Amino acid sequence: MAARELVVLGTASQAPTRTRNHNGYFLRWDGEGLLFDPGEGTQRQLLLAGVPSSAITRICVSHFHGDHSLGLAGVVQRLSLDRVPHPVPVHFPASGLAYFERLRSATAFHDVAEVRAEPVAADGVVATGGSGTIEARRLEHVIDAVGYRLVEPDGRRMLPDRLAQHGVAGPDVGRLQREGTLTVGGRSVQLDQVSAPRPGQRFAFVMDTRLCDAVFALAEGADLLVIESTFLEEDAALAHRYGHLTARQAGLVAARCRVRRLVLTHFSQRYADAERFGAEAAGEYGGEIVVAADLDTIPVPPRRTDPDR
Ligand SMILES: [Zn+2]
């Protein structure tokens, strides 16, 4: 099975530090590669993480603060330098089109890659591909910001022993999957007799925002949730003023939305010990918490077996 994993490129809010680059997240999802929020230095972080530019098939920008988008200029030019043959759509809040265009054409370069602006003007589906749909929702930050989620539709997993038992083999398997019913040796076989539910997987990406309904909607049932936790609860007033979440709020979202693996990131430089974010979120959420560090690779958890989220 092809890999589904998150490669963390950067985890610092506002300004990079000695150990944390500006934001950047690369989601490997079967044959697709989604680059989220390329902050300054993303091109080099991709190199250090061993991700070639050709692996990027789509770019999603949450908003046009520099820590989430300054790296777009470099990445866009790298796609051309490497003559990446496939088109690369770029999603971003529609009101930021002028920022996108500046970053898209920041300096002179031989512009050959097909980098396609696909601004997000409203909540809903922004793209549908082989492995699911990508949806965006408006968040609550000090400028227009959107969050994203990738939703793979639920499907069914064929059970080899049951197929054999019912005498279904070869091209008949595909036919039964498409049509839901099949006649074999004069007897009718239903799809649910030879298969089990296969719940689709979900990935959610929630960057700069206050706690709002959209955060919960994006995170609902996520197998992997990447969420900003800029502040600790002791600075909740600051978090609210600047349109950010605290680690406690991130934990609360993960618990309420039945998230399976929680990735905290986008840390303020004011705290010396990042483990405090994990400890605070753990007060609300009993699941697995990853306090992200640059160049971490975090797998999407194995597929759920129960169909209920
Ligand atoms: Zn930010």
Image (tube, helix red, strand yellow):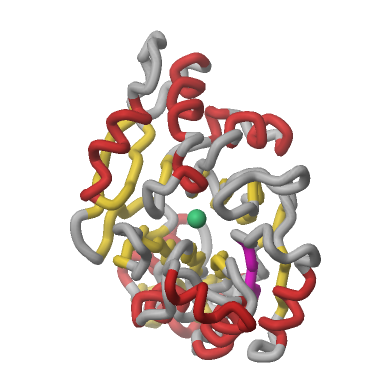
Residue 219, compared with residue 39, is above or below; it is below
* Whether residue 40 can be seen here: yes
Whole-percent x and y of residue 106? Answer: 38, 22
Drawn side of residue 157 relative to residue 100, left or right: right
**Magenta run includes residue 87:** no
Q: Residue at x 27, y 61 (%)?
A: 125
Q: Which residue is drawn at 48% across and 70% down?
A: 244
In depth, the one of 92 and 204 nearer the eye is: 92
Q: Residue at x 60, y 45 (%)?
A: 22
Q: Give the range drawn in magenta.
A: 260-265
Question: For residue 175, which quarter of the picture?
Answer: bottom left
Residue 43, compared with residue 197, is above or below; it is above
Drawn side of residue 291 relative to residue 201, left or right: right
Residue 156, compared with residue 78, is above or below; it is below
In depth, the one of 24 and 275 nearer the eye is: 275
Whole-percent x and y of residue 249? Answer: 55, 82
* Whether residue 34 can be seen here: no
Question: For residue 122, which quarter of the picture?
Answer: bottom left
Q: Residue at x 58, y 66 (%)?
A: 230
